[in-house]
Image (spheres, rainbow, N blue to C red):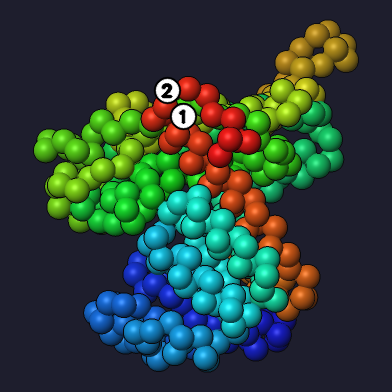
Amino acid sequence: MTDDLTDIKTGIVGLGNIGQYHAERLRELGVPLVGGMDVAAEARRRFARRYDVDVYEDQQDLYETIDAVVITTPNKFHEEYAIAAFDRDIHVLLEKPLAHSYESAQRIATAARESDSYCMVGFNNRFANTVQIVKNRIDRGELGEVTHVEANYVRRRGIPGRGSWFTRRQIAGGGALIDLGVHAIDLALYLLGYPDVEEVTGVDRSEFGSREEYAYLEMWGDDTGPRGFDVDDSASAFVRCPGKRTISLEVAWATNRPTNHEFIVRGTSAAARFDLLEGDLTIHSASTSGPDHLENTSIEARQNDTHTAEQRAFFNRIVRDNGSNETVDQALSVQQIIDSIYRSSEEGKTVTLDDV
């Protein structure tokens, strides 16, 4: 870490659990955390006690004191806080997804392009050591031409908190698809080299969250019952890109099947299979050197804290003044795919992205 990182005065907007999670990592990196903002008084008091910093009810008061901000609010409010930061040329680390709707995401992307500040969207899973090993092998050509990614982000029972903003479409914009699917779609496109997308077909389902009898072992938030639950708890989709490159997607908060975080990256020379959360990685290939044979090579890598790695990349790009807003445009593409899956499900047909 360079001394320059300690010159970037940073604040957090949204002081709940995710905001505190980011605050801990800012402290570990040595980035000065100078303040926070939240509309909830109790969240402000808790954050002030824990981190001994000034807290504000209005973002403009915070923005007068900082060079960079981490925005961790519910999805609907990303636009308000991000655009206000761009107007002041404050650098923004914005938690995924880009927004709660494609239209809001477009406005954020436009404002980011017009600002002199740098913005990164929080696709932290890109920074997993396992993912970086696979990406490096793809870049070196060891997998050949990558043509298909099977992306799974499936929980057997894992609705974040029934009754919370996560389960209300007006605030979140969706359920499992916009919460977990955003990670899976980004990672699949990232490993494919972020190609254009031609068409999408998909189905979203709400089968468990609205039940009075919802059996679960643990829940991230409090369970206040099914009232107000109006989002999807699972989705299946197929994404077609030019050159016969494709993505198959399975995401779920709740479903009657085993938990699955497996990604399979299929190439013409080899394939990579890894568990996104556990980090297990195997390279599958075949050879005619000697008798024909199949090879399955296991690779062990140290697990790393992906949010810390994400923050380090964000601040290093600010220091080096070489950050582009590439992830904002990519996040806009992800948002368009999510919107297209919802449309495809509602209309019962394949959606061409030129029509979105």
Q: Quadrant of residue 241?
A: top right
**Residue at x 63% of width, y 36% of height:** 354
Amino acid type of the residue that numbered disc 1 sits on in the rendered structure:
Ser
Image position of 261 with respect to 107: above or below: above
Does the image show residue 187? Answer: yes
Q: Secondary structure at mark 1?
A: helix
Q: Is residue 331 left or right of residue 44?
A: right
Q: Quadrant of residue 336?
A: top right
Callout 2 touching callout 1 (CB < 8 Å): yes
Q: Position of residue 307 (x, y in %)?
A: 54, 62
Q: Position of residue 288 (x, y in %)?
A: 85, 12
Image position of 323 with respect to 131: above or below: below
Check disc 2 and report the residue beneath it.
348
Q: Is residue 300 left or right of residue 208?
A: right
**Residue at x 63% of width, y 80% of height:** 89
Check disc 1 and report the residue beneath it.
344
Closer to the camera in the image, 131 or 238 = 238
Closer to the camera in the image, 146 or 84 = 84
**Residue at x 38% of width, y 84% of height:** 58
Q: Secondary structure at mark 2?
A: loop
